[in-house]
Image: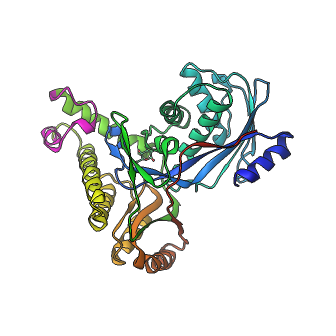
């Protein structure tokens, strides 16, 4: 559903026109599971977004519709108040509710109820951050229609806290940041400790970025949070001797070695991956500046190996697509986002593109009896208003 269709749907349901907003999903070229460790990430917003049409309704209730949801499984409609006790039971509505609650905690109350429709074309469960896109879209829209005065940093934080407190995933800031700050044609090199960022123009001449969606999602709620806890335990162990270490970003491999017999083998190897990945991102940025995409691509393969063997967030489907990319001579390939399913991101020379996509589709289909989905990446703009009413 695009902006025009969502506007028409809003009129059909509520009899008036609403304002329409969009906020995109994201890719991340390299730097995975580094954000909540204070490291660097290199995301970009994409041309797929979550949309909302919205209008204040003068009551103390939110009336929401999610017409894209499968009507067999979930309710399309949700009505709820804005107090903590009013949490709706529909999962999609909890994102809207959570954003309102987090805004109030930040000292700016959503002053009245509103009517809202949400929709979008960010594939769900594909590692392209549909939930961050939704949080950012709702946050941006509420901020605008009620003149709440939050800036984009605060809106990204509000989205992240919604995820922590109303969805239960203790995510980092990358996804919401990319959704709020995206810029067409540029990746964002974000320092997740200081939140300093730099737009990194990305136009790899002679190469394409393509996502291949395994169309599986194996993530169990706690897997992500467990990895975060591993990192925190290791930080605590290192900080006993080096109190300046507050996050794995502040540590190095030598200090990690010092605690090898104080932390579990699993926590150790996960932290080793994170420390290596932070450095790998910095090295990759240098390679990209030189236009050495083959060497940058090799870093992406290293990330995949680390995510698969050390951080253990890959799965057979993702490993298979990664191997296929290697066999086809693709410059770089790796699991993207949180892992446990979703997409691989691939940096492919133009002349290899057709053969790679055909072979990956056919081989994956044969192996897993699932047809993977292919998305060419277009780096687009961040959260924005589409139509004024
Ligand atoms: C998910 C989280 C992000 C980040 C990635 C892994 O997308 O929402 O904060 O941690 O996983 O890099």
For the point 74% across and 45% down, the residue is 75
Q: Is residue 358 visible?
A: yes
Give residue 262's position: percent from left, percent from top: 18, 36
Q: Is residue 121 above or below residue 58?
A: below
Query: Left or right: where does residue 150 sit relative to residue 115?
Result: left
Question: Residue 360: where, in percent of width, then height?
Answer: 46, 75
Q: Position of residue 253 (x, y in %)?
A: 17, 44
- Quarter of the image with the C terminus is top right
Q: Residue at x 42, y 56 (%)?
A: 336
Q: Find out whether residue 298 is within the magenta segment.
A: no
Count of numbered badges drawn on the protein: 0
Note whether 83 is above or below 338 in the view shown. Answer: above
Q: Residue at x 56, y 45 (%)?
A: 133
- Image quadrant of residue 140? top right
> Considering the image in quadrants, where does the N terminus appear?
bottom right
**In the depicted view, which residue is nearer to us: 310 or 17?**
17
Would residue 338 be seen by someone viewing this image from the given angle? no
Q: Which residues are magenta?
A: 241-260
| Left/right of residue 388 with respect to residue 312 in the rendered view | right
Relative placement, left or right, of 253 versus 356 is left
Front-most of residues 43 and 63? 43
Residue visible at 52% across and 41% down? 180
Please provide percent x and percent y for residue 56.
75, 30
């Amino acid at each position: 559903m695009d902006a025009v269709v969502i506007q028409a749907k809003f009129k059909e349901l509520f009899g008036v026109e609403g304002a329409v907003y969009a906020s995109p999903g994201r890719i991340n070229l390299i730097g995975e599971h580094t954000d909540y460790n204070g490291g660097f990430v290199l995301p970009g917003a994409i041309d797929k977004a979550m949309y909302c049409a919205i209008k204040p309704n003068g009551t103390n209730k939110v009336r929401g519709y999610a017409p894209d949801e499968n009507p067999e499984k979930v309710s399309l409609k949700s009505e709820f108040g804005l107090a903590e006790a009013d949490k709706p039971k529909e999962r999609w509505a909890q994102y809207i509710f959570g954003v309102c609650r987090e805004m109030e905690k930040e000292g700016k109350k959503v002053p009245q109820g509103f009517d809202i429709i949400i929709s979008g074309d960010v594939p769900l469960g594909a590692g392209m951050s549909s939930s961050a896109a939704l949080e950012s879209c709702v946050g941006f829209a509420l901020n605008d229609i009620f003149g709440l005065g939050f800036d984009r940093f605060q809106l990204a934080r509000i989205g992240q806290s919604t995820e922590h407190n109303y969805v239960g995933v203790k995510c980092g800031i990358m996804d919401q940041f990319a959704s709020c700050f995206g810029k067409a044609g540029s990746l964002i090199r974000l320092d997740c400790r200081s939140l300093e960022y730099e737009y990194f123009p990305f136009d790899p001449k002679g190469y394409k970025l393509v996502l291949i969606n395994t169309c599986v999602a194996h993530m169990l709620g706690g897997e992500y949070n467990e990895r975060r806890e591993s990192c925190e335990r290791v930080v605590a162990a290192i900080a006993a001797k080096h109190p300046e270490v507050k996050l794995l970003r502040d540590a190095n491999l030598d200090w990690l070695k010092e605690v090898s017999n104080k932390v579990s083998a699993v926590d150790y190897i996960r932290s080793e991956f994170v420390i290596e990945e932070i450095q790998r991102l910095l090295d990759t940025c240098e390679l990209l500046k030189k236009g050495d995409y083959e060497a940058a691509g090799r870093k992406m393969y290293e990330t995949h190996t680390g995510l698969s063997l050390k951080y253990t967030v890959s799965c057979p489907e993702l490993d298979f697509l990664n191997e296929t990319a290697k066999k086809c001579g693709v410059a770089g390939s790796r699991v993207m986002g949180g892992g446990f399913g979703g997409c691989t991101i691939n940096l492919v020379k133009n002349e290899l593109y057709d053969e790679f996509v055909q072979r990956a589709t056919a081989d994956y289909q044969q192996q897993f009896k699932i047809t993977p989905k292919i998305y060419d990446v277009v780096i687009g703009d961040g959260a924005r208003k589409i139509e004024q009413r």
